[in-house]
Amino acid sequence: MTAPFAFDPSNEVHARTLARLDAEQVAWIGTTGRDGYPHAVPVWFLWLGDRAVVLSEPRTAKVRNLEADPKVLLHLEAGADGEQLAVLRGVAALTPNGGPAWAERIGDAYGAKYDEWMLRLGLTTETMFARYSTVIEIVPVSLIAW
């Protein structure tokens, strides 16, 4: 397995990417489909210092794809000026039925970030972690950014 990527906060691009990982609400997750074609979907995520955590419904294409091949991209939007590319290449680990345990670990942070969005969808933190019960942990192995 490739060693995890370590951000260097003294590097301007790394520092900006870390700030965006903490603040951005939506990222795109890219997996390889069973047909060999890329599959990309927007996701909510939390950045936990050295990894991204994504909640997913269990029977989605991204989960099936990651079960077959754990290589993944986490791609942020281009930034306010359209010029801030940030793509993490990484390896994903899946925790099926992990929602309740993860709710205890990150429920408050997740709620703080997404409460308003969840309310619009008629979800609470509790129902979110129950419905989106597969936890995807993405550990980056490289960064493509400028």
Image (cartoon, rainbow, N blue to C red):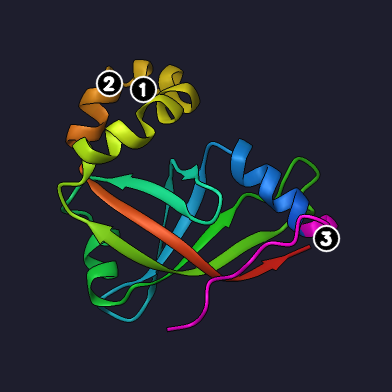
Residue 23 drawn above or below residue 73: above
**Sequence-wise first label, 2 or 3:** 3
Q: How crowded is mark 2: few (under 14 residues within 10 Å), some or many (20 or more)?
A: some
At a point 37% along the width and 65% down the height, the residue shown is: 92
Residue 132 appears in view = no
Find numbered disc 3 in the image and state the secondary structure of the residue it sits on.
Answer: loop
Question: Which residues lie in the magenta part?
Answer: 1-13
Residue 108 appears in view = yes
Q: How far apart are marks 3 and 1 (CA)?
A: 35 Å
Q: Where is residue 124 in the image (x, y as percent from the top left)?
A: 28, 19
Identify the mark at residue 118; answer none if there is no mark. 1
Q: How far apart are marks 1 and 2 (CA)?
A: 5 Å
Q: In which quarter of the image is the N terminus?
A: bottom left
Residue type beneath disc 1: Met
**Sequence-wise first label, 3 or 1:** 3
Find numbered disc 2 in the image and state the secondary structure of the residue it sits on.
Answer: loop
The residue tagged 3 is 11
Find numbered disc 1 in the image and state the secondary structure of the residue it sits on.
Answer: helix
At a point 60% along the width and 40% down the height, the residue shown is: 22
Q: How far apart are marks 2 and 3 (CA)?
A: 39 Å
Q: Position of residue 141 (x, y in %)?
A: 54, 73
**Sequence-wise first label, 1 or 2:** 1
The residue tagged 2 is 123
Residue type beneath disc 2: Leu
